[in-house]
Amino acid sequence: MKLIARIILIILFTYLLSFVLQWWIIIAISFLVGFALYGNGFNVFISGFLGGGLLWLSYAWYLDIKTSAILSEKIVELFPFNDNIFLIIGAGVVGGLCAGLGALTGNSFRLMFVKRKTKSFYS
Amino acid sequence: MKTFRFIFFLTITIALGVSLNTRIAGVPPLGKFLSPFHGFWQNAEEAGINYEETLDMEGLTAPVTVYYDEMRIPHIYAENETDLHRVQGYLTARDRLWQMDFFSRLVFGRLSEVLGERTLNFDRFNRRIGLKKMTEDLLETIQSDPDLLPVLNAYSDGVNAYIDQLTYAQYPLEFKLLNYEPEAWSPLKSCLAYAMLSNTLSRGESDLENTNALALFGKDMFNLLYPDQLGNLDPVIPKEKKWSFDPLKVIKPNIPYPLTTTKKTIEKPHPLNGSNNFAVSGSKSKSGHVMLANEPDLELTLPSIWYAYHLHTDDKNVMGVTVPGTPVILIGFNDSISWGVTNSPRDQVDWYSIQFRDENRSEYLYNDQWFKVEKQIEVFKIAGGATYTDTIIYVHHGPVVYDRNFFPENGKTNYAMKWIAHFPSTTINAMYEINKAKNYEDFTKAMVKFQGPPQNFMFGSTKGDIAVWLPGKFPVKWREQGKYLMDGSNPAYEWKAYIPFEHSLFAKNPERGFLSSANQHPVDTLYPYYTYDHNYEYYRGRRINDRLRILKDMIPKDMMKLQNDNFNYMASESLPMMLNYLDTGSFDTQAWNYHKTLSEWDYFNEPSLKAPSVYQLWWDILYQQIWDEIDTVSIAIDRPNKYVTIDLLKRDSSLVFADILATNARETTRDLINLTYQKAIDSLDVRMSQNNEDLSWFTFKNTTVRHLLRLDPFSVDQVRVGGYASIVNAASKGHGPSWRMVVEMDPAGTKAWGVYPGSQTGNPGSPLYGHMISRWASGEYYPLLFGPEIKNSDQVIFTQTIQPQ
């Protein structure tokens, strides 16, 4: 559940704030989400990666379709790829890494203050 | 452990963030650049009209209305001139901000700040030849013009109003690619066009190359290879013109030229920068109205060198093109007059060798005395943080461009550059007045202020006048003064006086009913002043005049047809001779086939023909082989031009230069032509069989409109256009008609047509990027919406209102 909540929060806040703030706000938001909804490091990273990655990928894709790939087809020639889909994937991977690492860092920051729970007798 | 883990992740995250925010090894900062909310995705535009219907703008005194037509030319209707130019600045920035920034960095020698080490020498060069200084001096002059100064200020405010509201996401694409920010515009930057155009148009010269050639060949051979004038010329000023004034006299001093040779000389403006213009009077036109045509042939770039405007207030109604960053229209028309310019080659640069007293270089010899130099320290910031300092030494002639730090030649040569463009100039003031000129008298008044770069100003008016003026600042020179390097210590080499304006070259309403110019000789030798240039055009002008002499009852379409004329005059004068020399007896089938292609050709360089490709390749090889002697010389020497080359080939079958150095035999002209024909055929076969080319002319010459950063994806190649260098339709590989304009001076309302190889928008992410190229290539025009009333015209596709804030 936490995984989905993190993904939703990252997507929502990054989407809203990216229009007014710098690109790296995705890292800051993921940090805060990782901090608030802490948990298993791997899970936190995955939720960041999926949240940030899906958002950047799908928004890039949406813009690309809306503009009939007018620019991505030119930009991709400046990179060592031959298909503009790689730019969309690239945006997804970069967004994913930023959010994933941001969330992971937030999580590890939070864990500094969380006392390891002694295993409950009932669990 | 937990702290360590946190610090570890934090470090990785920050490192990732920073590296994605940094341009590394030429790769744009990937985080910023790929973010769909900020990066290049935001520069992609949807098809359709994306202008805002209303805008608010600080500083406006009244609402301004902007109408857009199909070409996306803004027709700005304002109540006063400052409002007009404020909006103009804003709109130019919207469409061309990065190009404006690029131009200003070029002129001020600041490209290295964003492009790095690779442009450092280019920046140094531009500051040494004085582009920065002449722009600063120009603003100084404009400060005292109470009409023009507010225009520059308003324009600059408009540009800054646009820049101030930009977020990173809205930066033009090139800023994102190179990872830098737009900086504030200024009235100073708006003066850049003067330095840019002077640098492109009036800096050409061959003084040092001439000195080298003179030292190497001697006077007789020099005059044979580089003659001042050859017969069969059709100068700009019709030959009937008589000169009745008493010229200022200069006497050639009896002194020798210093024959110091120079190994390597500085980069010159491209020899293919040129232009055509012509005007016909009512006697030649069907309607009885004057018609005028102009097209400047410059480097074909995206964004285009020109931006088109229609500027309207109660006392100004002018339309045409200007260089982005410049408020005044440089080529265009208003409701009473039209004008067009072509470059008038007229040596504007002289070089003086300077002798310093000692290593300190603080004094130089002049008239047997030592004089103090002025030293200017120029600092260059280089992307990445380094700085470079260069000291430029000024003597009274001008900046010492060649010295021990720049193009050093054993550390001994010091050459000072004297360039008319360095003098205080009121050229922009002149253009501003032409924009408002109502008749021939207003126009000639503005001509007094025009100081260069020397242009052939073609003029046409609704009152029926046509005229050509060649205004500018020209020293009175004795024969061959400044054709070679001169001794800077001897006052006898100095310019003593300037040609008075009243003695300027001009012609008005000639009996033949037309005037034209195409970078040829300005005037025949009967003009009582010495005129010289190293690079005249020999073909376009003659073709235009040949046609205009014949044509009558002309309609605008005839003007357009002539602008797009593909007749290869040079081929018509050289190919029959070349074919005559061929020994057809030894031909194989292949050689016969090409021979047939060539002999059946009518000399028109149409895009789909094969013959122009065969001729051009053969000529290029022939030209290269005939002057192979020059390639082996270790000093800088120009090859004789193609007109002279053809003349020599025709006159002298045993020409000494015909010998091919790479062979042991001693070739005659006949041998040379046969050998190069075979070489051309071999090369054409390779192109066809290995590269799969069909040899059609347009693919062979490959006219390309190139992005200013030379990025292929933002450039358009293989443009299907005919013509070539020295053809009226001067579209060569990288140069060509950068704005074609035809105007009919109908007293009931000026009618005009225009097209240029590019688009108003400079955004490679716009579906309109370069949209006019195909129409330009096929010789079609857009009707230019002008008036008198445009509000309700069906040519208006969008109306925008800009409100005072």
Image: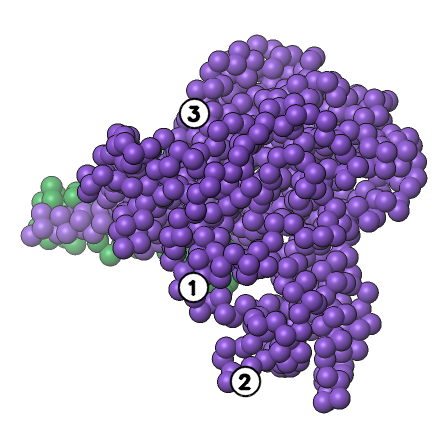
Q: Position of residue A45 (x, y in %)?
A: 27, 53
Q: Residue furthest front?
A: B254
Q: Earlier in the sequence, mark 2 or mark 3?
A: 3
Q: Position of residue B174 (x, y in %)?
A: 45, 44
Look at label 2 and name its amino acid.
Ala
Instruction: Please state the total of marks drawn on the protein image.
Output: 3
Which of the numbered marks, if any, corresponds to residue A80? 1
User: What chain is the green one?
Assistant: A
Side (left or right) of B612 relative to B509: left
Q: Chain of mark 1?
A: A
Look at label 3 and name its amino acid.
Asp
Q: Chain of mark 3?
A: B
Decide: is B461 above or below B388: above
Name the residue carrying label 2: B665
The C terminus of chain A sits in image quarter: bottom left
Q: Residue at x 65, y 16 (%)?
A: B78
The answer to whether tags 2 and 3 share a subunit is yes
C-beta proximity under 8 Å, tags 2 and 3: no
Decide: is B721 above or below B155: below
The reply to whether residue B162 is in sight is no
Q: Could you say which quadrant of the image residue B303 lies in?
A: top right
Q: At numbered mark 1, what does the secondary structure look like: helix, strand or loop?
A: loop
The answer to whether tags 1 and 3 share a subunit is no
Between B147 and B237, the residue placed more toward the observer is B237
Between B312 and B287, the residue placed more toward the observer is B287
Name the residue carrying label 3: B137
Chain B representation colour: purple
- Camera-side mark, 1 or 3: 3
